[in-house]
């Protein structure tokens, strides 16, 4: 089997609410104790698919955010953040994950910057969050040496630029890179 969750897949098919609840409990217990990011993402995605109650979603998000805090790989950080998003995070969790990704982006010098930037966009729902993300991405764009990554950051900045002044600042930053 390709999935690490193979033993639990038959439980997912159960129509009984009691079986689904039991499955969620088992998966959540596994997630909370898991140390491997890839397995944690699979567990979180499986939990999200079982319509968990708010308390279970919060515990799962907490485990993922704790794991994300120590993550150094761009792709894994993006995957963990995506798993948090699928668990319907409240604004506080969204902001925490967004800040972790922005911090991670500050040290990203390769092609992983674009994926992280796109995940930051998905997390930025309030005007303040979008402004914070835009300012951070603009600052990164100014000093980013990798042209491919700079192009991806520029695309992300353009998605976050909502006012004429935002677009003007983004244009000036891009022209300054030329």
Image: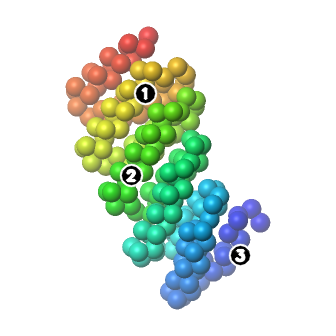
Tell which circle, 1 or 2, labels the residue nearer the N-terminal end.
2
- In the rendered view, tell whether residue 166 sits above or below residue 178: below
- Displayed quadrant of residue 25: bottom right
Give the labeled residue for mark 2. 96
Instruction: Report how far apart the C-alphas of labels 1 and 3 lie in the structure.
Output: 44 Å
Q: CA distance from mark 1 to mark 2?
A: 19 Å
Using the image, determine if residue 70 lies above or below residue 103. Answer: below
Which residue bears the numbered disc 1?
140
Question: Which quarter of the rendering shows the N terminus?
Answer: bottom right
Please tell me whether mark 2 sits on a helix, a strand or a loop.
Answer: helix
Give the residue at x 46% y 43%.
101
Left or right: 120 in relation to 10: left
Given residues 159 and 138, the one toward you in this image is 138
Q: Does 33 appear above or below 25?
A: above
**67 up-or-down from 50: above or below:** above
Q: Which mark is residue 7?
A: 3
Q: Are marks 1 and 2 in contact (CB under 8 Å)?
A: no
Dot placed on the residue nearer the N-terminal end, 3 or 2:
3
Residue at figure coordinates x 50%, y 86% from the top left: 17
Can residue 83 be seen in the rendering of this structure? no
The extreme front residue here reads 70
Q: How would you rate the neighbour count of disc 1 (Cα within 10 Å): few for under 14, some for 14-19, many for 20 or more?
A: many
Whole-percent x, y for residue 158 in the image? 36, 30
Among the 4 quarters of the image, the one containing residue 43: bottom right
Left/right placement of residue 119 relative to residue 164 reads: right
């Amino acid at each position: 089997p390709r999935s690490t969750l193979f033993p639990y897949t038959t439980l997912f098919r159960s129509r009984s609410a009691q079986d689904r609840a039991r499955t969620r409990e088992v998966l959540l217990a596994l997630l909370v104790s898991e140390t491997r990011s890839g397995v944690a993402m699979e567990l979180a995605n499986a939990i999200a698919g079982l319509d968990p109650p708010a308390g279970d979603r919060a515990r799962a998000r907490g485990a993922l955010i704790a794991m994300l805090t120590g993550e150094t790989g761009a792709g894994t950080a993006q995957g963990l953040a995506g798993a948090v998003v699928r668990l319907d995070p409240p604004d506080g969790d969204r902001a925490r994950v967004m800040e972790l990704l922005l911090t991670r982006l500050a040290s990203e010098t390769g092609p992983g910057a674009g994926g992280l930037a796109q995940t930051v966009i998905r997390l930025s729902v309030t005007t303040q969050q979008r402004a914070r993300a835009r300012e951070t991405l603009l600052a990164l764009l100014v000093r980013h040496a990798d042209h491919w990554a700079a192009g991806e950051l520029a695309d992300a900045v353009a998605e976050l630029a909502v006012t004429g002044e935002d677009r003007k600042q983004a244009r000036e930053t891009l022209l300054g890179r030329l």
